[in-house]
Every structure is written in structure tokens, then in C-alpha cells.
Image: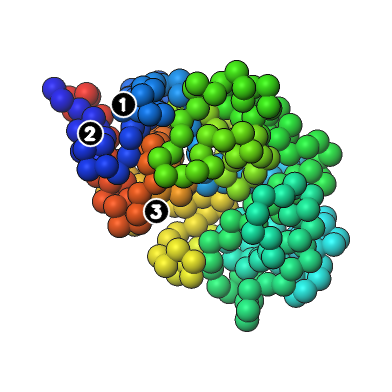
Amino acid sequence: MRSGIVGEIERGIGAGWHAGAQVYASVGGKPRVEVALGEAQPGVPMTRETIVEWASATKPITCAALAVLWERGAFDIDDPVHHHLPEFAVAGKERVTVKHLLTHTAGLTTSLTHQVPAAELVADVCASPLRPDWVPGQRCGYNSIAMWIVAELVVRLDGRPFDQFVREEIFEVAGMDDCWLAMPPDAYESNQARIARIPAIARSGTAYWVTWRRPTGGIHGPISQLGRFYESLPRLLSPATLRAMTSHHLTGVYDEVLDARLDRGLGFVLGSGDPQYGFGDRASLGTYGHGGQTWSTAFADPARDLVAAVYWNGAATPAIHADRLPRLLNALYADLADFDG
């Protein structure tokens, strides 16, 4: 029997949409699909061990890090951010709450357009105004830079550097021993041959990009490691906290940045069939996850005890991604049903 997943990946390779792909899926915590096809770099085969860029599929991990401290009573989700980050209370941001950060309703801005250390970027976001005419909580617009403030809250509340907190409180607990939020320079040197480089993305796979401590989208590792995060969420968080993170805090709300109507939890997109930002037509309504740029996505479908994570080694246009994403995920569900049959 020919896998529908393989067919979809090969279709995209033939069309020039991507050079290769990794797909991972588990049911009941047991791996059922581990596919690696095509190239990671020109002339270098993609393998299951190839290190890939998760992009914004990183964001649920950043949010889960803060949720660990919420569960421990370090703050309340409706706290104004400035209660824990006093310098944030300027330029109209006094009403922004932690919940607004996690639901993309904060409307934060920055004047910076280039790579800078975390402290400099956080200071700039704190000093910058909200988007024009923005009322926190009343409008939604994908707000990637809010994750810098989420990460800074973890640092202020716990004391450890954010990448250390993620390593010790999430990666080690989940058994994610082959991924990095900010790969150390020596690890980068020793792993260069394993790192995928996305065609036409100049920064992809470079030292400055892979080693940058970027809570918005900086984690690199085999895509199966991202799947392990979703498998481990019931261990990382209590049932009550995980339920709160994956409940509907926004339903059918228009995202002014993504130009799409999505349901959101706290750091997660929920049960969406949107062709560009969703989880395919077969995912149950309780599915939660997140994509990254146009080359990664991961989610958990609790109704089927399914976890899936996908990486394409190629940045597609929005229209192409809206085609290849649901087709591959629908093929994944079909393949799993065929395997069970």
C-alpha cells in the first residue's frame, strides 16, 4: 500500500514547493508515522534526525512555560502585565493583561526590525505604544512580539534565563533531548551537517539564526521532538491548567493580521479547518496546536489520542500552503485509518 503522506510530499517536491519533508505522528503516545523524504540541504538527504526550524510552532512551548508558573501560583492570568513588569506600564499599555498576550489581543508594537539581544527587544516593546486605536481584548491581531513579553514574565517570575527554564521545565520533563531554543555555538558547529536549510531563505540554518534566543519561533530540532511536546503536555501541566489553555477564549474572532477567523485558546489555535492555519478536515473540534510560517505545524487531537507534527523544507506562498497543508493532514488521517484497517 502506497502512503498518501508520501504521495503528497512527492507531489510538492515535483512542483518545486519544497525540497523535502519530515512527518511524525503518534497514537496513544506510540509512534505510528515517521517519514523523512527529499533533501535537507542541496545533495544532503532529509532524515528523521535532521534538525529543522519550527518557526512559530515554537509559540505554544513559550506559552506552556508561562503556564507552568501560573499553575504554581506565581501570577493570575488576568493580572495586568505591569504588575510583574513595571516598565511595561507606559504608552497606553496599562490595561494589557497576561491573557491578552496569550490570545493575541494585546496589540503590542516594536520599533526594531533587526536581530537584537532579548533585553533590548523587551525594553523597546515596553516603551512602544499599542497599535493605532487598539483597545486590548476587543480586537485580535496575530502579535508575535507578545511572546518576548511572555518569555520575560517567565524570567521575572522565576529568575532563570528563559532558555534554561524551557530546557529544565519542558524539554527535560518531556524527553526532548535533541532540540534547542538557542543552540550553543559549539553545538551548532558540531551539528551543521544535520541542520536543514530552507531554499530561498538566506538566514535559514545560519549560526546567527539558529543560536538566537528567540521565544517567538527559535526552536530547532527534528520535528518528532515537537510531537513529543504535545504527547507530554498532560505531564507538563495539570488537567485543569491544560484544559484552561486549550479551551475557547476566542471563538470565530477575526484576526486582523492573518486575515482569518480562528478559535484561540491560551497560546493555541483550536479545532480549525482553515486551510492555511488549521489541522485539516478530519481533525476533531477539540484539536489544538499551532503552525510556523508556511513550513511547520503540530497539534494534538485528543478525541483520537493523536499527535502530529510536520515540517516542509520549503517556504510556500500562502495559496500553495493552503493547498498542501490540508491535503497532507487529510492524507495522514487516511493513512492511519488504513493502517488500523
The residue singled out by tag 2 in the image is 10
Q: Position of residue 166 (x, y in %)?
A: 68, 34
Give how far apart the Cα atoms at labels 2 and 1 are. Answer: 8 Å
Residue, far top: 190
Dot 2 or dot 3, earlier in sequence: 2
Residue 220 picture quarter: top right
Residue, far left: 1
Give how far apart the Cα atoms at labels 1 and 3 are. Answer: 23 Å
Mark 2 vs mark 3: in front: 2
Q: Quadrant of the N terminus?
A: top left
Amino acid type at circle 3 is Tyr
Badge 1 marks a residue whose secondary structure is strand
Residue at image location 75% in from the left, 75% down from the top: 92
Callouts 2 and 1 close, C-beta under 8 Å: yes
Dot 2 or dot 1, earlier in sequence: 2
Label placed on residue 37? 1
Give how far apart the Cα atoms at labels 2 and 3 are. Answer: 22 Å
The residue singled out by tag 3 in the image is 277
Q: Position of residue 298 (x, y in %)?
A: 43, 40
Amino acid type at circle 2 is Glu
Callouts 1 and 3 close, C-beta under 8 Å: no
